[in-house]
Image (cartoon, rainbow, N blue to C red):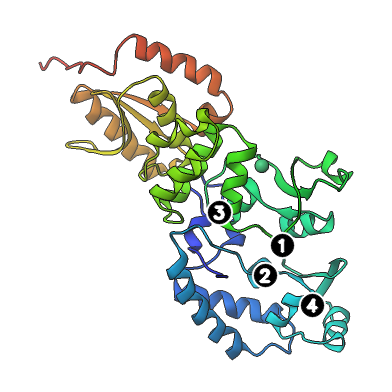
Amino acid sequence: MRIQCNDVNRMEQQDGHGDASWCVFANFRIYIHRIAIYHQLLPTCVPLARLIDRTKENLANNTKNLCNGGMYLDSQFLGVFNRSALAQIGIINDRQLKKSISAGELNRIARNWFALKNANPRVVAAIHIGARVGCLTGCSLFGIWVPRNTGIHYVLPVSRSRPAVTYRDNACLHRVRRLIQDPIYSLDECIKQVLQFHDRETGFIILESAINQGLISLENSRRYLESQTQKKAALSKYLCATSESGSESRVRLFFLLKRTHVQSQVQIDGIGRVDILVGRSLIIECDSAAYHSEYKRYIYDRQRDLAALSLGYKVIRLSYEQIWSSWEHTQGILSKALQARIHRKFTYIRRA
Ligand SMILES: [Zn+2]
């Protein structure tokens, strides 16, 4: 079943690099607001009332489909349409199509493909080279956390040669036997592509984000992983719903693979909720640049660090760059911290 919506906030990813202009909706108020914005950009032949009615319909469908992974992003919200999807915006014949193109409301981007002025540029780029958006790029459009600088992930048929433009772009090409008719793969297809084409850690991170956002159930995620290679399937027992960002999932998985007891989002009396508790006494906080740059938050975090110290905990605060740009080095230090067993003992401060 085709649905259109998701949560607007899902695109505002925890590490502050979400593509906020490409969000989808769960909240009806936001939904109507967005429709109004779109209406100004749509061809004048589209009656607003029709769009709102369709929105209500799709909101109901969305609720039904949230947890089975069978989610689609509708052409209207991507701003990209194939010939048959043009009916969604009221264009049902060649005369209306020509009128919309000459009025500058629609652009022809490939044979039988059209885009609104504010269409998603990644989806337009894919259609332009005869590909579709999928894998990590598709996941990010559904609101799943993906690392920065992963480039655009195109899906191309095996029969097609590599387009020249992808050599220049930071593009990742995946091959399939046949392309779908839609501009973007469904949520479950995008997740399966990540699991198939990328390493097991990336797949694990994507699944945990999808679970945390309520896009897929824990059981289905485990099933997806278990259908992969033995090495990938081995991670299924570590999946949990509490990791709030990909950074947190990456760090948690590092400790789990070291066979260390790890808990995510733990409430500790006198400190509050911490990202990760390793063993008994090591707290790991995964900072994101966007979230922690606020001065008030900075002060609050330092107060928590001091409170943790007074209770005998050690706190390691990791930046986005330490987790994603210099991860090798960071892992080395964390391994040494484990060897020193700082996660096993509380270091109490002698009171004066
Ligand atoms: Zn990919």
Picture layout, residue 325 above or below residue 85: above
Q: Nearer the viewer, mark 4 or mark 3?
A: 3
In space, the residues marked 3 and 2 are separated at their CA atoms by: 18 Å
Residue 246 picture location, percent across and down: 48, 39
Q: Residue furthest top?
A: 340
Q: Which residue is mark 2?
A: 75
Q: Residues within 10 Å of mark 4 (few under 14, many from 20)?
A: some
Q: Splitting the image into four quadrants, where does ligand 1 fall?
A: top right
Whether tag 3 and tag 1 are in contact, CB under 8 A, the answer is: no
Q: Nearer the viewer, mark 2 or mark 4?
A: 2
In space, the residues marked 4 and 3 are separated at their CA atoms by: 32 Å
Write down the quadrant of residue 20 in the picture: bottom right
Callout 4 amino acid: Glu
Q: Which residue is mark 4?
A: 105
Q: Which residue is mark 1?
A: 183
Q: Which residue is mark 3?
A: 188
Earlier along the polypeptide chain: callout 3 or callout 2? 2
